[in-house]
Image (cartoon, grey):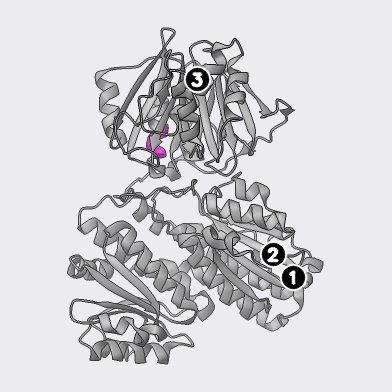
Amino acid sequence: MCGIVGYIGHRNATPIILNGLKRLEYRGYDSAGLAVLQDGRIEVRRDAGKLSKLAALVESQPLNGHVGIGHTRWATHGEPSARNAHPHVGSTGEVVVVHNGIVENFLELRADLEAEGVKFNSDTDTEVIVHLVERFLASGTSLEESVRQALRQLRGAHGIVVLSSREPDKIIAARIGNAGGVVVGVGEGEMFVASDIPAILEHTRQMIFLDSHQMAVVKADGVVVKTLSGQVVTPQVHHISWDPVAAEKGEYRHFMQKEIHEQVRSLTDTLAGRVDFDEGTIRLPQLNLTPELARRIQRIYITACGTAAHAGMVGKILIERIARIPVEVDIASEFRYRDPIIDADTVVLAISQSGETADTLAAMDESRRKGATLWAIVNAIGSQAMRIADGYIAMQAGPEIGVASTKAFTAPLVDLYMLAILLGDLRGTLPETERKRLVADLRLIPDLVSRCLDREAEVVQVAREMRYIRNILYLGRGINMPIAYEGALKLKEISYIHAEAYPAGEMKHGPIALIDRDMPVLAIAPKDPWYEKMISQIEQAKARGGSVIAVATEGDERLPALCDHIFWVPDAPWMLSPVVTVIPLQLFAYHIAALRGLDVDQPRNLAKSVTVE
């Protein structure tokens, strides 16, 4: 969950690390710190709160050196405070560590170290790591071997970076299990380490992604990657095509607003090279889907968390309807605990923006153990989910910085639609004429989304009127039921308004008791197969005195008479309508939060990538 940056080279490390941490602040912003080798000594600056406080501290107490590491924290063990901020320095002042993950046996390790006379200066689990490294270093072993031995003592999943004044020409980085990724950036006469691509993208596009139980010994002139047992491995160097400017806000007030507006481009990129409109066919080459495998599949489990799980709920409807394969959607944190029925004819499809979500990776590990075929829909190139899958679909959304996901929701909706068509085609369940019609509908998507964004001013007006609400009920049916869940999630994530979503047909089984003049209802009611039933639900809400906002198809003449406010969307093929209906809900959540003066990109208690369980 936390952000890590490291640098070794010929330049001053401090501004490089601070700028990198700024690009990772979406991963955690409870506290921040950095450590730099200055005149042969480790100098540390750290503080509670957001990165701006650390930047001010460094300005008043400058650091200059060619080697350093930094960290921005999402608190797990120990409250957000200066004493619990990373980096953590050992007793001798010769070793410093930054860490992403949870040391599951830290109480046991801490007790052992305290029995040896070690004094702890924080409440964190991370501090045991630096003391363990110091213990082995004191026995005369090298820094590399000391880190290796320390890591063998730890339980849990970790991303760790270590620096020592004893061996100032190197940084040691390691990854264990499914905790946040470790990326090594390859430069010319300089090297970089980070927990995510945006931190170092302005300096290099050549990236090495560590696999679990790998360690990188990083020097200014190169890197050696080894297993934790010491075996040298030849890493793959990935070229990252993202434009560094894409990770900047530009003209927009917040990253979230920028990313909402980037959806026309991201959806165009999602289709590029994958759709042959002349032939009416879909190509997903990285999925490694053969006709034999397509015909053999007996069931698909979609596993994901949060927004990605809502995309999976839409995918279930699409795959079952088009490809006629039974699909279940599982919240990844619960998946493996129910002992799902998995065999060689099962596909487990993981959806993750970061490709580093701990629960999703654990679900993939369990599925691999049981013999399933693993697929992933993932945005982050080179991420763990992409590497361990048997096949994958890259979202093509580009970097997403805002904690509340937007373009990494609509991209997998289209990916799942294309996957359903390809599966139906290969299995023979989709007639050619129907396949060509479904493929042709994809051509409409970028323009439909653009037309939704053109109506942003109308959404702002409703947001102004509704910004002081304390509760709201979201309702949807059929393929737009998951969009109700997603709309409610977006609002609660960034505005802290209690928003609850229900299948519209369930309203009268309980939630209708909540409806009064202080409980507005947001109903997703485009002209789809469930339209008439949504009209009935809206009428029931109005009969109880509720204020109703509806997402409605342009030209609808019935809803204006029933509703207090309308978010108009263009007419869209019903299977692709979620890509359209979610846009005003994203804008609504964004503008309410902005009007309330809240930190849209960094909502309290949340982080972009949940890399701990």
Q: What residue type is disc 2 on? A: Val
Residue extending farthest to the top is: 39
Residue 519 visible in the snapshot: yes
Q: Nearer the viewer, residue 396 or 589?
A: 589
Judge the density around disc 2: few (<14), some (14-19), many (≥20) Cα neighbours within 10 Å: many
Residue that mark 3 sits on: 163
Magenta stretch encompasses residue 21: yes
Q: Residue at x 52, y 71 (%)?
A: 313
- Gap between marks 2 and 1 measured at Cα: 7 Å
Magenta stretch encompasses residue 420: no
Q: Nearer the viewer, residue 26 or 432?
A: 26
Across and down, in percent, residue 281 comes to 69, 70
Q: Is residue 120 above or below residue 276?
A: above
- Gap between marks 2 and 3 measured at Cα: 42 Å
Residue 297: assigned label: 1
Q: What residue type is disc 3 on? A: Leu
The answer to whether mark 2 and mark 1 are in CB contact below 8 A is yes
Q: Is residue 99 left or right of residue 301?
A: left
Q: Residue at x 59, y 51 (%)?
A: 361
**Magenta stretch bounds:** 20-24
Residue that mark 2 sits on: 347
* Quadrant position of residue 167: top right
Query: Sequence-wise, which precedes: disc 2 or disc 3?
Result: 3
Residue 186 visible in the snapshot: no
